[in-house]
Image (cartoon, rainbow, N blue to C red):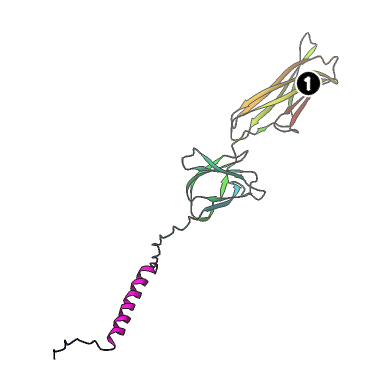
Amino acid sequence: MAPQEEREISPPWAIPVLLVLGLGGALALVMAITQPKEEVPPEEVPTIPPVLLANIHGVVTDAQTGAPLANVVVELWSSDGLERLLSTTTNSSGSYSMADIDPGNYLMRFAAGGYEMATGTVTLQEGDNEVNAALSPLAKAEFYMPAQIDVKVEDGTILDMYWNCIFTVPISNVGDAPGKQRIHVIAITDGEVHRDYTQEISLQPGQTYLWELKQWVDFRRLSYYKVTISGDWEADNYAEGVARR
């Protein structure tokens, strides 16, 4: 009898194990192929916080009296003074404001009629900034004339018929700046206008001009000769003088 070939018989659990392992391996492979890759979030770039803007406000007053000034023009210029950026005016209480300005260095100007312009540099920070200004009144001429004209009557020297009437009045500049003003001269004799003219006077501060008018008057026919001078600087400022024999 021929000897039988010995075969190695796998234990009964080997195939199922292999199958399980094989299926597991295949399943793992399928999962590796079909499952989408997990997305990696992009690296976050830090955001730059927005720059806060600057606001500016203040009050403009008279440097001598401290009273608030209305209608003052307030301007914001570039630091080199070449570009005007913003402009506003003060209200009745002297207040002004400007908003939404980039922080930095600027030039500010305050201007009003009758006052010296105030100019200065400011550095605006983020948020509220307060900038107040006091304006000095402009130097100006101020004319003064007394209400009474000095009158002197000299005896007649021309054929003993005419009397020499001399009218004088001082006009002074009591202000702190040079100035020019006009005076209006009217001479009346017995109700009729004898002279009517204007004259311009230029005076330095503290200077006085002695205005003078000489007129020969025939008092044999006329009862008086009156001169009136009014100044343009004040509606009710006038001087008067009457010559009689």
In this view, 22 is above or below 141: below
Q: Callout 1: few (<14), some (14-19), or many (20+) C-alpha neighbours within 10 Å?
A: many
Left or right: residue 137 compared with residue 213: left
In this view, 154 is above or below 208: above
Depth order, front residue of 131/204: 131
- Residue 9 in the magenta stretch? The answer is no
In this view, 233 is above or below 129: above
- In this figure, which residue is indicated by the disc labeled 1? 187
* Residue at the outermost front position: 1
Q: The N terminus lies in which quarter of the figure?
A: bottom left
Depth order, front residue of 110/174: 110
Say which element carries label 1: strand
- Residue 28 in the magenta stretch? The answer is yes
Quadrant of the rendered image containing residue 233: top right
Q: Residue at x 64, y 34 (%)?
A: 142
* Residue at the outermost top position: 159
Q: The C terminus lies in which quarter of the figure?
A: top right
Q: Residue at x 36, y 71 (%)?
A: 30
Span colored in magenta: 12-39
Depth order, front residue of 162/22: 22
Report x, y in % for residue 94: 63, 49
Amino acid type, callout 1:
Ala
Report x, y in % for residue 40: 38, 65
